[in-house]
Image (cartoon, rainbow, N blue to C red):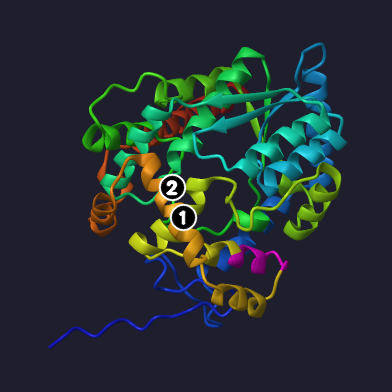
């Protein structure tokens, strides 16, 4: 006899279901743990004596004070997408002087290049574009594809993180501004992404599935380097948009009018590879439609209704003719034949945790810090007595 298939349950509030991730539960009203977790996150963030805007204004004043007499008072990562572009507009409104950093990994769309150049020109800011060696980055991405791990975007995000920290050290900058926000990004099903800062994982995947060539130029930050920055430079990363009443559509209207920004038609579609990854690789190999979490965030933040999200989800992921062209472009850039790519798509799926990770090192470090703080507290109590 065949085993009975478990009954699939879909959240009554957002779009996620038990088919999307094993790590999900539902309350008596059918609302999933990601929605209740979202509410808990927002409540915890707002559980502060001062309003978010007051706290943000205080940080802005501190940035300006610490940046006095220096060329820059903060670093701003700019992808050309909605969030980072709105962040740039906001920073200009505050009179901040950021060093703008962009990561060119070889996959920028022409529109993204135009948007980024236009933004920096209009705002009169310096743009530091770090161009990754394409042959190295190509080999890294191919290793991830062959390994069958889900989060190929780790490679770009880790490189951005490493470059920003290096530049912060070089220019003695104490603040980095980040476009991450709870309103549109807090909900992400377990297993859909991986830790962007885990260089040990990157290195092991490349060692097992890469070309065998030594990585010479890829920007990275291992455990010891990250610990050094954490302990001594004390750079503060500010998720600015969490302190603001951030609305995606309103943000698009502002940056279109103020900065001449042009839309890409999808979240993170400023990158040719990211677009192909989200509309073809993720659903085709991993059964993941990222629109579900993107739309679920907008539902939870009150920007759209569940009915509106369901209607958008009914729309096809891509235009067939457009996808054919983009697939040919991606395969040609990777140097893969259709047969080789199909073998990758049909190959086994592996978890990132199947490879080496620096998670244990960080756990040991924070355990040590906890024990040390406990000892110091005890000593302090004894001194008082």
Q: Give residue 214's position: percent from left, percent from top.
A: 29, 21
Is residue 130 shown left or right of residue 149?
right
* Residue at x-position 48% and y-position 37%: 156
Q: How many marks?
A: 2
The 10 Å Cα crowd at callout 2, few under 14, some 14 to 19, many 20 or more, is some
Whether residue 263 is visible, yes or no, is yes
Q: Are marks 2 and 1 in contact (CB under 8 Å)?
A: yes
The alpha-carbon separation of the residues under discs 2 and 1 comes to 6 Å
Q: Give residue 230's position: percent from left, percent from top.
A: 54, 25
Residue at the left extreme, as displayed? 1
* Residue at x-position 69% and y-position 49%: 82
Q: Nearer the viewer, residue 29 or 165?
A: 165
Residue that carries the numbered disc 1 in the rendered image: 325
Element type at mark 2: helix
Q: Give residue 255's position: percent from left, percent from top.
A: 80, 47
* Residue at x-position 46% and y-position 39%: 196
Residue that carries the numbered disc 2 in the rendered image: 329
Whether residue 333 appears in magenta in the rendering, the answer is no
Q: Nearer the viewer, residue 384 or 10?
A: 10
Is residue 57 shown left or right of residue 37?
right
Judged by its main secondary structure, the magenta piece is helix
| Quadrant holding the N terminus | bottom left
The 10 Å Cα crowd at callout 1, few under 14, some 14 to 19, many 20 or more, is few
* Image: magenta residue range: 295-303
Q: Nearer the viewer, residue 281 or 54?
A: 281
Residue 245 location, quadrant:
bottom right
Q: Nearer the viewer, residue 193 or 267?
A: 267
| Quadrant holding the C terminus | top right
Element type at mark 1: helix
């Amino acid at each position: 006899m065949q085993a009975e298939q478990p009954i699939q349950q879909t959240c009554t509030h957002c779009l996620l279901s038990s088919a999307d991730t094993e790590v999900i539960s539902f309350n008596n009203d059918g609302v999933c743990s990601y929605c209740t977790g979202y509410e808990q996150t927002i409540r915890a963030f707002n559980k502060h004596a001062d309003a978010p805007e007051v706290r943000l204004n205080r940080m802005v004043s501190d940035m300006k004070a610490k940046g006095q007499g220096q060329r820059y008072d903060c670093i701003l990562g700019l992808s050309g997408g909605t969030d980072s572009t709105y962040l740039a507009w906001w920073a200009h409104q505050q009179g901040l002087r950021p060093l703008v950093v962009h990561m060119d990994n070889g996959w920028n769309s022409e529109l993204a290049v135009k948007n980024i150049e236009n933004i920096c020109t209009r705002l009169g800011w310096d743009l530091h574009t770090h161009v990754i060696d394409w042959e190295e980055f190509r080999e890294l991405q191919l290793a991830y594809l062959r390994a069958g791990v889900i989060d190929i975007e780790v490679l770009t995000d880790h490189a951005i993180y490493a470059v920003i920290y290096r530049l912060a050290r070089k220019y003695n900058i104490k603040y980095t501004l980040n476009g991450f926000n709870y309103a549109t990004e807090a909900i992400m099903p377990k297993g859909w992404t991986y830790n962007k800062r885990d260089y040990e994982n990157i290195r092991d995947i490349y060692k097992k599935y890469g070309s065998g060539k030594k990585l010479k130029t890829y920007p990275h930050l291992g455990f010891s380097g990250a610990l050094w920055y954490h302990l001594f430079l004390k750079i503060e990363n500010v998720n600015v948009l969490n302190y603001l009443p951030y609305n995606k559509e309103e943000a698009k209207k502002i940056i279109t009018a103020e900065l001449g920004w042009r839309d890409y038609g999808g979240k993170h579609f400023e990158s040719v590879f990211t677009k192909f990854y989200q509309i073809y690789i993720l659903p085709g190999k991993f059964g993941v439609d990222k629109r579900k979490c993107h739309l679920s965030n907008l539902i939870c933040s009150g920007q759209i209704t569940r009915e509106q999200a369901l209607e958008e989800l009914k729309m096809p992921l891509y235009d067939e003719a457009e996808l054919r062209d983009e697939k040919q472009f991606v395969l040609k850039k990777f140097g893969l034949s259709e047969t080789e790519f199909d073998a990758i798509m049909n190959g086994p799926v592996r978890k990132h945790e199947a490879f080496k990770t620096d998670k244990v090192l960080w756990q040991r470090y924070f355990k040590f810090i906890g024990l040390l703080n406990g000892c110091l507290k005890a000593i302090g109590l004894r001194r008082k007595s």
